[in-house]
Amino acid sequence: MTKHEFQQRIAEGPLILDGATGSNLLKAGMPRGICSEKWIAEHPEPLIQLQKAYIEAGSHIVYAPTFLANPISLGSHGLAHETRRLNHDLVRISKEAAAGKALVAGDISTTGKLMEPMGEMPYNILFEAYKEQISCLAEAGVDLLTAETMMAADETMVILDAASEVCDLPVLCSLTIESDGSLFFGGNIYDALETLEAVGADAVGCNCSVGPDQLEAVIAGIRERVSIPVIAKPNAGMPKITETGEAVYSMGPEEFALHMETLHKAGASLLGGCCGTDPEYIRMLCKKLSSS
Protein backbone atom coordinates (compact mmCIF):
# COMPACT_ATOMS: atom_id res chain seq x y z
CA MET A 1 0.00 0.00 0.00
CA THR A 2 1.36 3.40 -0.96
CA LYS A 3 0.79 6.57 1.03
CA HIS A 4 -1.62 7.77 -1.66
CA GLU A 5 -3.58 4.51 -1.53
CA PHE A 6 -3.84 4.86 2.26
CA GLN A 7 -5.23 8.37 1.88
CA GLN A 8 -7.78 7.13 -0.63
CA ARG A 9 -8.87 4.28 1.65
CA ILE A 10 -9.30 6.40 4.77
CA ALA A 11 -11.34 8.90 2.75
CA GLU A 12 -13.93 6.15 2.21
CA GLY A 13 -14.68 5.85 5.93
CA PRO A 14 -13.15 4.82 9.25
CA LEU A 15 -10.61 2.01 9.42
CA ILE A 16 -11.04 -0.48 12.24
CA LEU A 17 -7.83 -1.68 13.89
CA ASP A 18 -7.43 -4.81 15.99
CA GLY A 19 -7.42 -5.08 19.78
CA ALA A 20 -4.90 -6.36 22.32
CA THR A 21 -2.43 -9.08 21.39
CA GLY A 22 -0.20 -9.74 24.40
CA SER A 23 -2.89 -10.09 27.07
CA ASN A 24 -4.88 -12.48 24.90
CA LEU A 25 -1.83 -14.61 24.15
CA LEU A 26 -1.09 -14.83 27.88
CA LYS A 27 -4.58 -16.28 28.31
CA ALA A 28 -3.77 -18.70 25.50
CA GLY A 29 -0.70 -20.00 27.31
CA MET A 30 2.19 -17.67 26.50
CA PRO A 31 4.50 -17.54 29.55
CA ARG A 32 5.30 -14.23 31.22
CA GLY A 33 8.78 -12.73 31.14
CA ILE A 34 9.93 -14.30 27.88
CA CYS A 35 10.59 -12.86 24.42
CA SER A 36 7.05 -12.88 23.06
CA GLU A 37 8.25 -12.46 19.47
CA LYS A 38 10.27 -15.68 19.68
CA TRP A 39 7.44 -17.53 21.45
CA ILE A 40 4.87 -16.52 18.82
CA ALA A 41 7.21 -17.58 16.00
CA GLU A 42 7.50 -20.99 17.64
CA HIS A 43 3.80 -21.22 18.61
CA PRO A 44 1.92 -19.47 15.79
CA GLU A 45 -1.53 -21.01 16.19
CA PRO A 46 -2.80 -18.83 19.10
CA LEU A 47 -1.86 -15.68 17.17
CA ILE A 48 -3.47 -16.96 13.96
CA GLN A 49 -6.71 -17.78 15.76
CA LEU A 50 -6.74 -14.40 17.53
CA GLN A 51 -6.16 -12.41 14.37
CA LYS A 52 -8.73 -14.42 12.42
CA ALA A 53 -11.20 -13.59 15.19
CA TYR A 54 -10.37 -9.87 14.97
CA ILE A 55 -10.90 -9.89 11.21
CA GLU A 56 -14.18 -11.79 11.56
CA ALA A 57 -15.22 -9.16 14.14
CA GLY A 58 -14.52 -6.36 11.65
CA SER A 59 -10.86 -5.32 11.85
CA HIS A 60 -9.55 -3.87 8.59
CA ILE A 61 -5.96 -3.87 9.89
CA VAL A 62 -4.18 -6.36 12.14
CA TYR A 63 -0.80 -5.68 13.69
CA ALA A 64 1.93 -8.25 13.05
CA PRO A 65 3.42 -9.19 16.46
CA THR A 66 6.75 -7.45 15.73
CA PHE A 67 6.33 -4.93 18.56
CA LEU A 68 9.85 -5.38 19.99
CA ALA A 69 11.49 -7.16 17.06
CA ASN A 70 14.18 -4.51 16.64
CA PRO A 71 17.82 -5.51 17.20
CA ILE A 72 18.16 -3.41 20.38
CA SER A 73 15.18 -4.94 22.16
CA LEU A 74 15.89 -8.44 20.82
CA GLY A 75 19.47 -7.96 22.00
CA SER A 76 18.27 -7.95 25.61
CA HIS A 77 17.27 -11.59 25.01
CA GLY A 78 20.46 -12.41 23.12
CA LEU A 79 18.49 -12.50 19.86
CA ALA A 80 19.73 -9.48 17.89
CA HIS A 81 21.09 -11.84 15.24
CA GLU A 82 17.54 -13.18 14.74
CA THR A 83 16.07 -9.81 13.73
CA ARG A 84 15.53 -10.65 10.07
CA ARG A 85 14.22 -14.17 10.64
CA LEU A 86 11.79 -13.19 13.40
CA ASN A 87 10.33 -10.23 11.50
CA HIS A 88 9.87 -12.34 8.39
CA ASP A 89 8.33 -15.25 10.32
CA LEU A 90 5.96 -13.05 12.32
CA VAL A 91 4.74 -11.16 9.26
CA ARG A 92 4.22 -14.44 7.44
CA ILE A 93 2.09 -15.72 10.34
CA SER A 94 -0.08 -12.58 10.32
CA LYS A 95 -0.44 -12.69 6.54
CA GLU A 96 -1.58 -16.30 6.86
CA ALA A 97 -4.17 -15.22 9.43
CA ALA A 98 -5.32 -12.26 7.32
CA ALA A 99 -5.64 -14.37 4.15
CA GLY A 100 -6.11 -11.23 2.09
CA LYS A 101 -9.17 -10.17 4.13
CA ALA A 102 -7.34 -7.45 6.09
CA LEU A 103 -4.20 -5.34 5.85
CA VAL A 104 -1.16 -6.36 7.88
CA ALA A 105 0.77 -3.61 9.66
CA GLY A 106 4.39 -4.01 10.67
CA ASP A 107 4.35 -3.09 14.38
CA ILE A 108 7.22 -1.05 15.83
CA SER A 109 7.67 0.36 19.32
CA THR A 110 10.06 2.07 21.66
CA THR A 111 13.32 0.40 22.64
CA GLY A 112 12.78 1.79 26.13
CA LYS A 113 16.14 3.55 26.01
CA LEU A 114 16.07 7.35 26.22
CA MET A 115 17.75 9.29 23.44
CA GLU A 116 20.49 11.83 23.97
CA PRO A 117 20.54 14.33 25.63
CA MET A 118 17.91 12.97 28.08
CA GLY A 119 19.47 9.53 27.96
CA GLU A 120 22.46 7.66 26.54
CA MET A 121 21.03 6.37 23.23
CA PRO A 122 22.66 8.12 20.22
CA TYR A 123 20.49 8.99 17.23
CA ASN A 124 22.61 7.01 14.77
CA ILE A 125 22.43 3.76 16.76
CA LEU A 126 18.67 4.03 17.09
CA PHE A 127 18.28 4.99 13.42
CA GLU A 128 20.23 1.94 12.25
CA ALA A 129 18.23 -0.35 14.54
CA TYR A 130 14.90 0.88 13.26
CA LYS A 131 16.16 0.92 9.67
CA GLU A 132 17.11 -2.75 10.02
CA GLN A 133 13.71 -3.73 11.37
CA ILE A 134 11.76 -1.67 8.85
CA SER A 135 13.81 -3.13 6.00
CA CYS A 136 12.87 -6.61 7.22
CA LEU A 137 9.19 -5.68 7.53
CA ALA A 138 9.11 -4.19 4.04
CA GLU A 139 10.85 -7.25 2.60
CA ALA A 140 8.33 -9.49 4.37
CA GLY A 141 5.45 -7.70 2.64
CA VAL A 142 3.62 -5.65 5.25
CA ASP A 143 0.99 -3.28 3.87
CA LEU A 144 1.89 -0.40 6.19
CA LEU A 145 3.87 0.43 9.33
CA THR A 146 2.67 1.45 12.77
CA ALA A 147 4.82 2.97 15.50
CA GLU A 148 2.75 2.47 18.66
CA THR A 149 2.97 2.98 22.41
CA MET A 150 5.70 5.52 21.81
CA MET A 151 6.76 7.60 24.81
CA ALA A 152 8.17 10.68 23.08
CA ALA A 153 8.20 12.47 19.76
CA ASP A 154 11.98 12.30 19.24
CA GLU A 155 12.20 8.50 19.09
CA THR A 156 9.11 8.38 16.87
CA MET A 157 10.79 10.84 14.52
CA VAL A 158 13.72 8.43 14.21
CA ILE A 159 11.28 5.73 13.06
CA LEU A 160 9.88 8.12 10.45
CA ASP A 161 13.40 9.01 9.30
CA ALA A 162 14.33 5.33 8.99
CA ALA A 163 11.10 4.45 7.17
CA SER A 164 11.54 7.25 4.64
CA GLU A 165 14.97 5.90 3.72
CA VAL A 166 13.75 2.33 3.31
CA CYS A 167 10.30 2.41 1.71
CA ASP A 168 7.19 4.37 0.75
CA LEU A 169 4.82 2.56 3.10
CA PRO A 170 2.32 4.60 5.12
CA VAL A 171 3.40 5.09 8.75
CA LEU A 172 0.86 5.41 11.56
CA CYS A 173 2.19 6.91 14.80
CA SER A 174 0.50 6.67 18.19
CA LEU A 175 1.86 7.85 21.52
CA THR A 176 0.90 6.76 25.03
CA ILE A 177 -0.24 9.61 27.26
CA GLU A 178 -1.80 10.74 30.51
CA SER A 179 -5.53 11.50 30.39
CA ASP A 180 -4.80 15.24 30.09
CA GLY A 181 -2.69 14.73 26.96
CA SER A 182 0.68 15.08 28.65
CA LEU A 183 3.55 12.79 27.65
CA PHE A 184 5.39 10.68 30.20
CA PHE A 185 8.77 12.22 29.33
CA GLY A 186 7.53 15.82 29.20
CA GLY A 187 5.58 17.94 26.75
CA ASN A 188 2.12 17.25 25.35
CA ILE A 189 0.66 15.10 22.61
CA TYR A 190 -0.67 18.03 20.59
CA ASP A 191 2.73 19.60 19.92
CA ALA A 192 4.28 16.15 19.43
CA LEU A 193 1.76 15.00 16.83
CA GLU A 194 1.92 18.30 14.97
CA THR A 195 5.68 17.73 14.69
CA LEU A 196 5.21 14.13 13.53
CA GLU A 197 2.82 15.23 10.80
CA ALA A 198 5.40 17.77 9.63
CA VAL A 199 8.09 15.09 9.28
CA GLY A 200 5.95 12.63 7.35
CA ALA A 201 3.52 10.63 9.51
CA ASP A 202 0.42 9.48 7.61
CA ALA A 203 -1.81 9.24 10.69
CA VAL A 204 -1.26 10.16 14.35
CA GLY A 205 -2.97 9.64 17.68
CA CYS A 206 -2.78 7.75 20.95
CA ASN A 207 -2.95 4.20 22.21
CA CYS A 208 -2.80 2.36 25.52
CA SER A 209 -2.58 4.36 28.80
CA VAL A 210 -6.23 5.03 29.62
CA GLY A 211 -9.77 4.12 28.62
CA PRO A 212 -11.80 5.79 25.87
CA ASP A 213 -13.98 7.55 28.46
CA GLN A 214 -11.03 9.82 29.30
CA LEU A 215 -10.03 10.76 25.76
CA GLU A 216 -12.81 12.78 24.14
CA ALA A 217 -11.13 16.14 24.78
CA VAL A 218 -7.73 14.76 23.77
CA ILE A 219 -8.98 13.38 20.45
CA ALA A 220 -10.87 16.60 19.72
CA GLY A 221 -7.72 18.58 20.52
CA ILE A 222 -5.61 16.42 18.21
CA ARG A 223 -8.17 16.79 15.42
CA GLU A 224 -7.85 20.58 15.70
CA ARG A 225 -4.05 20.49 15.46
CA VAL A 226 -3.39 18.07 12.56
CA SER A 227 -4.77 17.60 9.06
CA ILE A 228 -4.03 13.87 8.74
CA PRO A 229 -6.18 10.98 10.11
CA VAL A 230 -6.39 10.55 13.89
CA ILE A 231 -5.88 7.22 15.72
CA ALA A 232 -7.68 6.14 18.91
CA LYS A 233 -6.65 2.73 20.30
CA PRO A 234 -7.24 2.93 24.07
CA ASN A 235 -7.36 0.34 26.83
CA ALA A 236 -10.58 -1.23 28.12
CA GLY A 237 -10.70 1.26 30.96
CA MET A 238 -8.33 1.23 33.93
CA PRO A 239 -6.93 -2.04 35.30
CA LYS A 240 -7.08 -3.58 38.74
CA ILE A 241 -4.27 -5.98 39.58
CA THR A 242 -5.36 -9.25 41.16
CA GLU A 243 -3.44 -11.19 43.80
CA THR A 244 -1.96 -13.35 41.03
CA GLY A 245 -0.68 -10.31 39.14
CA GLU A 246 -3.33 -10.37 36.41
CA ALA A 247 -4.66 -7.04 35.13
CA VAL A 248 -8.46 -6.94 35.05
CA TYR A 249 -9.87 -4.02 33.10
CA SER A 250 -12.94 -2.09 34.19
CA MET A 251 -14.82 -1.66 30.90
CA GLY A 252 -16.84 -4.28 29.05
CA PRO A 253 -17.31 -4.42 25.27
CA GLU A 254 -20.60 -2.49 25.11
CA GLU A 255 -19.41 0.37 27.30
CA PHE A 256 -16.11 0.48 25.39
CA ALA A 257 -17.95 0.69 22.06
CA LEU A 258 -20.19 3.48 23.33
CA HIS A 259 -17.20 5.61 24.29
CA MET A 260 -15.39 4.76 21.04
CA GLU A 261 -18.38 6.10 19.12
CA THR A 262 -17.84 9.37 20.98
CA LEU A 263 -14.16 9.38 19.96
CA HIS A 264 -15.15 8.81 16.34
CA LYS A 265 -17.46 11.80 16.53
CA ALA A 266 -14.62 13.79 18.13
CA GLY A 267 -12.44 13.16 15.09
CA ALA A 268 -10.82 9.70 15.22
CA SER A 269 -10.97 7.76 11.95
CA LEU A 270 -8.71 4.81 12.87
CA LEU A 271 -10.21 3.04 15.87
CA GLY A 272 -9.31 -0.09 17.79
CA GLY A 273 -8.44 -1.38 21.23
CA CYS A 274 -5.35 -1.90 23.33
CA CYS A 275 -4.83 -3.64 26.69
CA GLY A 276 -7.82 -5.56 27.99
CA THR A 277 -9.69 -5.71 24.67
CA ASP A 278 -10.45 -8.79 22.60
CA PRO A 279 -12.43 -9.59 19.42
CA GLU A 280 -15.76 -8.99 21.14
CA TYR A 281 -14.74 -5.38 21.82
CA ILE A 282 -13.99 -4.91 18.13
CA ARG A 283 -17.28 -6.55 17.17
CA MET A 284 -19.24 -4.19 19.42
CA LEU A 285 -17.24 -1.21 18.14
CA CYS A 286 -18.14 -2.06 14.55
CA LYS A 287 -21.78 -2.60 15.48
CA LYS A 288 -21.95 0.77 17.23
CA LEU A 289 -20.32 2.66 14.35
CA SER A 290 -22.52 0.99 11.74
CA SER A 291 -25.67 2.02 13.60
CA SER A 292 -24.64 5.63 14.28
Image (cartoon, rainbow, N blue to C red):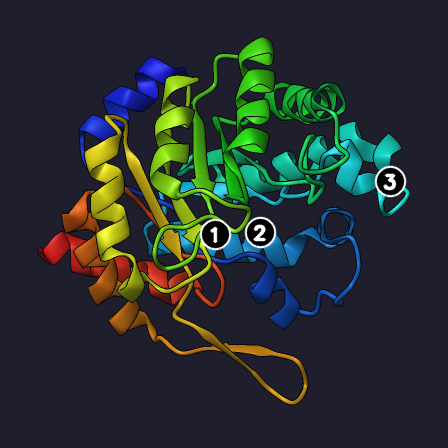
Tell me the tag on residue 79.
3
Q: Nearer the viewer, mark 2 or mark 3?
A: 3
The CA span between labels 3 and 1 is 28 Å
Q: Position of residue 261 (x, y in %)?
A: 19, 57
Q: CA distance from mark 2 to mark 3?
A: 23 Å
Judge from the rendering whether residue 236 lies leftward or rightward of residue 116; answer left or right: left
The x, y position of residue 284, in whole percent, is 27, 64
| Mark earlier in primary sequence (3, 1) | 1
Query: Dot 1 corresponds to which residue?
Result: 52
- Horizontally, residue 168 falls left or right of residue 76, namely left
Give above or below for 260 relative to 185. below
Residue sitting at 61 percent across and 79 percent down? 246
> Amino acid under label 2?
Ile
Disc 2 vs disc 1: Cβ atoms closer than 8 Å?
yes
Q: Which residue is mark 2?
A: 48
Q: Amino acid at mark 1?
A: Lys
Q: Report helix, strand or loop for mark 3.
A: loop
Report whether residue 14 is seen.
no
Near-viewer residue (104 or 272)? 272
